[in-house]
Image (cartoon, rainbow, N blue to C red):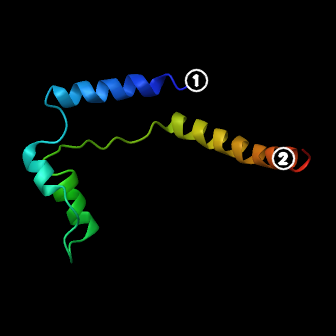
Amino acid sequence: MHFWLPIWHRKKKERTRKGGGLSEEKQQNSGKKEEGESLADYLSKRVFGGQEGVTEDPVPADVEGFDRFLKRYNEGLAIERAAVEHL
């Protein structure tokens, strides 16, 4: 049931044929990190150079909901563990 994979793959190929992907300049500059170059510099110059970003604060209700979910999920791991041990 991996129906999404062929669709994603097809869309990726279409983008590539239409000139999508990295520009020629980005392709030349996207090589390995230079010796002595920090990760922060590599990311800001080679990976995200020229890109504009936006920082958004999370919605407090979403954070609370995720915290509740994560707590229940972690509590359920013991149930999963017990089930596997008794197979």
The image quarter in which residue 17 lies:
top left
Residue at the left extreme of this rendering: 25
At x 65%, y 44%, the residue is 70
Please state, as top left, top right, bottom left or bottom right, where the C terminus lies in the image. top right
Rendering quarter of residue 68? top right
Q: Please determine whether, in this image, residue 48 is positioned above or below residue 31.
A: above
Q: Residue at x 50, y 22 (%)?
A: 3
Classify the position of the N terminus by image quarter: top right
Residue 23 placement, left or right of 14: left
48 up-or-down from 42: above or below: above
Q: Nearer the viewer, residue 22 or 41?
A: 22
Q: Is residue 10 above or below residue 23?
A: above
Q: Nearer the viewer, residue 59 or 34?
A: 34
Tell me where residue 53 appears, x and y as whole percent. 23, 43
Q: How many marks?
A: 2
Left or right: 62, with 58 as reference point: right
Q: Crowdedness of circle 1 by 10 Å Cα count: few (<14), some, many (20+)?
A: few
Q: Classify mark 2: helix, strand or loop.
A: helix
Q: Amino acid at mark 1?
A: Met
Q: Position of residue 14 (x, y in %)?
A: 24, 24
Residue placed under numbered mark 1 in the picture = 1
Q: Which residue is mark 2?
A: 84
Residue projecting furthest to the bottom: 36
Q: Position of residue 86 (x, y in %)?
A: 92, 47
Q: Label 2 neighbourhood size at 10 Å, few (<14), some (14-19), many (20+)? A: few
